[in-house]
Image (tube, rainbow, N blue to C red):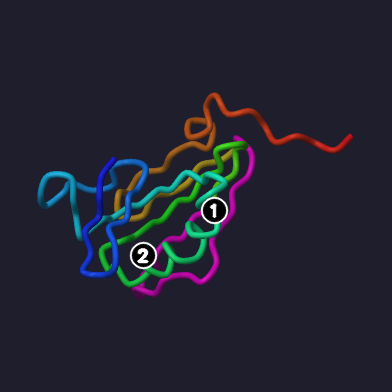
């Protein structure tokens, strides 16, 4: 886990490592941020954190993943530098997610290995 230092109200703690820190444990210039949803923080992850991430000009992609089913939401900075208002939603194990700024794609099946499929209504 790494800590992103900002000159704002708080330090934000992301789930995976997204960029090499400029000092041990901290960076102000992430390229990629990922969050794993948990019930107590879901509202914050989709609102407050995204509002704080959008002005970080180095940030190219923000990925929010469900911990309960293969579902992910991706915000990727446009070529003109604008930040999207709405994410691209991915559901299921098919396909992959492009991680802008890192020039890689990661398969949904790899992200959600070991996570059960969403229940279906019979």
Residue 34 image offset from top left, x and y in percent: 40, 48
Q: Nearer the viewer, residue 27 or 102?
A: 27
Neighbours of disc 1 within 10 Å: few (<14), some (14-19), many (20+) = some
Give the residue drawn at x 32%, y 72%: 55
Q: Nearer the viewer, residue 62 or 26?
A: 26
Q: Which residue is mark 1?
A: 42
Q: Is residue 122 left or right of residue 10?
A: right
Residue 39 vertical position relative to residue 53 in the rendered view, above or below: above
Residue 70: which quarter of the image?
A: top right
Of the two numbered discs 2 and 1 in the rendering, the one whose residue sits closer to the viewer: 1
Neighbours of disc 2 within 10 Å: few (<14), some (14-19), many (20+) = some
- Residue that lies at the very extreme toward the top in this rendered image: 114
Q: Which mark is residue 53?
A: 2
Residue 66 vertical position relative to residue 53 in the rendered view, above or below: above
- Give SS at disc 1: helix
- Residue that lies at the very extreme toward the right in this rendered image: 122
**Which quarter shows the N terminus?**
top left
Provide the major secondary structure of the magenta segment.
loop
Disc 2 versus disc 1: distance between alpha carbons?
A: 16 Å
Q: Is residue 84 magenta?
A: yes
Give the residue drawn at x 34%, y 41%: 16
Residue 84 image offset from top left, x and y in percent: 47, 70
Q: Is residue 46 left or right of residue 78?
A: right
Give the residue drawn at x 51%, y 42%: 96
**Which quarter shows the C terminus?**
top right
Q: Earlier in the sequence, mark 2 or mark 1?
A: 1
Give the extent of the magenta segment.
Answer: 74-93
Q: Is residue 77 magenta?
A: yes
Residue 56: which quarter of the image?
A: bottom left
Residue 46 image offset from top left, x and y in percent: 51, 60
Residue 49 image offset from top left, x and y in percent: 42, 62
């Amino acid at each position: 886990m790494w800590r992103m230092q900002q000159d704002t109200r708080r330090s934000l703690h992301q789930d995976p490592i997204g960029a090499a820190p400029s000092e041990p444990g901290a960076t102000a210039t992430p390229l990629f941020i990922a969050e794993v949803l948990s019930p107590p923080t879901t509202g914050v992850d989709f609102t407050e954190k995204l509002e704080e991430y959008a002005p970080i000009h180095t940030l190219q992609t923000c990925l929010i993943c469900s911990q309960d089913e293969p579902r992910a939401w991706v915000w990727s900075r446009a070529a003109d530098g604008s930040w999207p208002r709405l994410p691209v939603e991915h559901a299921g194990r098919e396909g992959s997610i492009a991680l802008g700024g890192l020039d890689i794609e990661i398969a949904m099946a790899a992200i959600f290995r070991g996570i059960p499929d969403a229940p279906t209504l019979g």
